[in-house]
Amino acid sequence: METTVSPPESTTNVSANVDPLEISAVNNHTDDTNNHTTTDAAVSYFPSDPMETEPNSEPPEPQGQPPPGSQPGPSPQKKRRRRRKIFTDMISTSASRLRVLRPHPKPTAAYSHSETDLNDSPSYHQPHRKRKSPPDLDKEVDIEALIAISVGFPVDSLTEEEIEANVVSQIGGVEQANYIIVRNHILARWRSNVSLWLTKDHALESIRAEHKNLVNSAYNFLLHHGYINFGVAPAIKEMKARPMDGMPKGSVIVIGAGLSGLVAARQLVFLGFKVVVLEGRARPGGRVRTKKMSGGDSKTLAAADLGGSVLTGINGNPLGVLVRQLGFPLHKVRDICPLYLPNGRMVNSDIDSKVEVSFNELLDKVCKLRQGIMEEVKSVDVSLGTALEAFRFVYKVAEDPLERMLLDWHLANLEYANATLMSNLSMAFWDQDDPYEMGGDHCFIPGGNERLVRALAEDLPIFSDRPVERVKYGSDGVLVHAGGQEYRGDMVLCTVPLGVLKRGVIQFVPELPQRKKDAIERLGFGLLNKVAILFPYDFWGGEIDTFGHLTEDPNMRGEFFLFYSYSSVAGGPLLVALVAGEAALKFENMSPMDSVSRVLEILKGIFSPKGIAVPDPLQAVCTRWGQDQFSYGSYSYVAIGASGDDYDILAESVADRVFFAGEATNKQYPATMHGAFLSGMREAAHIMRVVKRKSLALAEKMNNLNQENSDLDILFETPDLSFGKFSVLYDPRSADLESNALLRVAFQGEKLNSDFLYLYGLVQRKQVIELNKVEEDLNRIKMLNCDFQVRLVGRKDLCNSVESIITCIKSGRLSST
């Protein structure tokens, strides 16, 4: 929902939008140290691809040239570096330890010596050109291992999913070591060209024949779990349009058309399921929302990501795979981020560096503290804010007013990454996902992330404006009430945001298990808001992507503390101001006009002293994610008393009928767009495993039943007496007329085709004699039911007395042979 306000003194259009969120922030929790920095101009990957702001429309002409006479923007002096607090040497140590995986000192465990050089190969069909020496294979195995690590696989062990899928016959040992090498090779081979479908034969080309079973196991796992052959490239879509084996697997109702729901739906269709997607909004994408903005003359255009915006780490990121497949360019978010005081002056670089170092040291002290008292912290958690403030007080950090403003800016940045106040974050587990963080640059997609949404939503059966009110589940399937209609299926996948689950918007019948309800309550769901403003030209300078603003009020430190420049990616001169922490909560109740006026006031305070005029905006949009009835917030965080385990609990299925996906179900990658994507793939594979398990259990049951029927059929090949469709086996232990006998009646009808249905009954010998005297089987059935009160049953319902007779007959016939 959007409302537009036009102030009389300008041509600004201010929209209060109740639709969006920022999922992917710079979700590393502490945004200040990266492995590398750059002063280059914007880095564009795949630069040959034009930008796009709307489907089937020409990209807007680049905007942002200031009018003659205006002065250039400030020259940045400081680089903000995304900090990785721990596990900084994980990749390098992992590579060296990989050698212990091989059962032999030479690299021939799984590879063929005629392996193709994948990096030089434009397709999977190019013939082998050269042999590789053992050192070359060593290097390639290690490179492939690094690729697997970037995707999320452990160094020298199997994932829980691999163990559950029984990819090897025994955990540990040579087979597992070779499987890991094979798995990494297949993964790396597809990643070398993600636009082609990698077949099992392609994978076998460079693996020794003796390891064919490992290739089958690894290939099937990677395919079914969405690690290879996923996405929207034409070749991939063509293959995925054909269900794997043509056998129907059942029906799944997907609630929510966000990234997790769209990805899961596509994978489920490929796996052979019938799928329907129910979306409460009028559009797909969920918390990924790109808004097309324009000026009054419609010549100045821009695409603003009001929700999830940043691809946080491109290495191994599945969204990066989609970008490659679609040929979209990527814009690296440059690390340069000058900070400005309330009076508009740039912060002195020496003071800035000093406070930045102090901030990092405070975080390190908190990390060391919790490592020493982890068991105590687990039972009595405190907030990260309390711990940081205690150390700040003890070590007298940032006592100077200017330094305190700088420290507050870093704290606001931390509140931005976690979408909540420092006082809400768990000291023990707030950064539990750091070891899994995607590596590589943080990037924007020119034209907005909705381009990915459109590609993923293509050809899916999505029913919009279908808010779900009730989910009923049981042994016979699921019944979903949405938009005044009922939808029946075998299973349901719920991908709604954690905020919706917290509000209890959807009624589950029966109620969800207490364990899951407790996890929903413990985990936090925070808030981040944005103000996107389109200007007639770029007055702030195009050589930076971000700049920050300090405030004197600690309680409002997150108010427009960071500005993103989208000029290089949006198609027009667009600025996005972020509102985090306590300020984000207060922002929800501000009028759009007041919010935009406050942003302009800050911008004029920064640029007017430099002689740079801030023009009137052409259009402005304010988000209100906390009021959005389909999200009630922005993204998840680990609150006091919660832990990473709560993400896993939220991901647990219920009764093999109700499944859950979304960023808040992904322990490794919460609060990110790629975390949502991966959770959708995870649950598609989970649903497939459940169906297979049920099918195997049913097949085993039927096999046992058929085995039992087969044994009985053999006995009735030589009955003691038969007449019409009736056959009789006497109890060999007695010839008395009162003794028991097993009676079998054969039924045949059109629905049975040429097969017989056999029913059984326990009768006495004298009753058998009387039945034999009666003409026609129908009359005999009447006598059984009416006169003898005998009820015919199936094989599995026979009583113990009958089983005893069968055992005696088997024994007697065996002894006679």
Image (tube, rainbow, N blue to C red):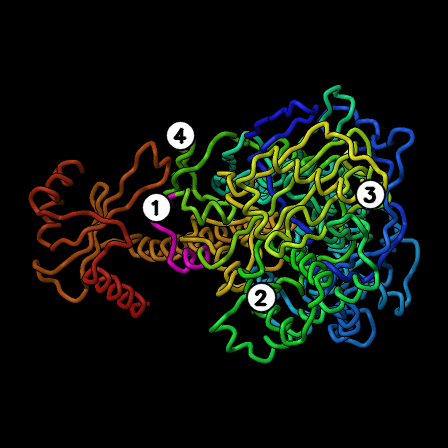
Marks 2 and 1, how far apart in space?
A: 38 Å
Mark 3–mark 2 contact, CB under 8 Å?
A: no
Q: Is residue 508 magenta?
A: yes
**Front in this rendered view, residue 782 or 558:** 558
Marks 4 and 1, how far apart in space?
A: 17 Å
Name the image quarter holding the C terminus: bottom left
Name the image quarter holding the N terminus: top right
Q: Amino acid at mark 1?
A: Val
Q: Earlier in the sequence, mark 4 or mark 2?
A: 2
Q: Is residue 705 left or right of residue 153?
A: left
- Residue 485, labelled with which disc? 4
**Front in this rendered view, residue 174 or 368:** 368
Say above or below: 255 vs 313: above
Tally the numbered discs. Answer: 4
Marks 3 and 2, how far apart in space?
A: 38 Å
Task: Report x, y in % for residue 127.
Answer: 88, 49
Q: Quadrant of residue 283?
A: top right
Q: Earlier in the sequence, mark 2 or mark 1?
A: 2
Q: Is residue 501 left or right of residue 681?
A: left
Callout 3: few (<14), some (14-19), or many (20+) C-alpha neighbours within 10 Å?
A: few
Q: Amino acid at mark 4?
A: Gln
Callout 4: few (<14), some (14-19), or many (20+) C-alpha neighbours within 10 Å?
A: few
Mark 1, secondary structure of its residue: strand
Mark 4–mark 3 contact, CB under 8 Å?
A: no
Q: Which residue is mark 1?
A: 509
Marks 4 and 3, how far apart in space?
A: 60 Å
The magenta-colored residue range is 507-520
Q: Amino acid at mark 3?
A: Pro
Callout 2: few (<14), some (14-19), or many (20+) C-alpha neighbours within 10 Å?
A: many
Q: Amino acid at mark 2?
A: Leu
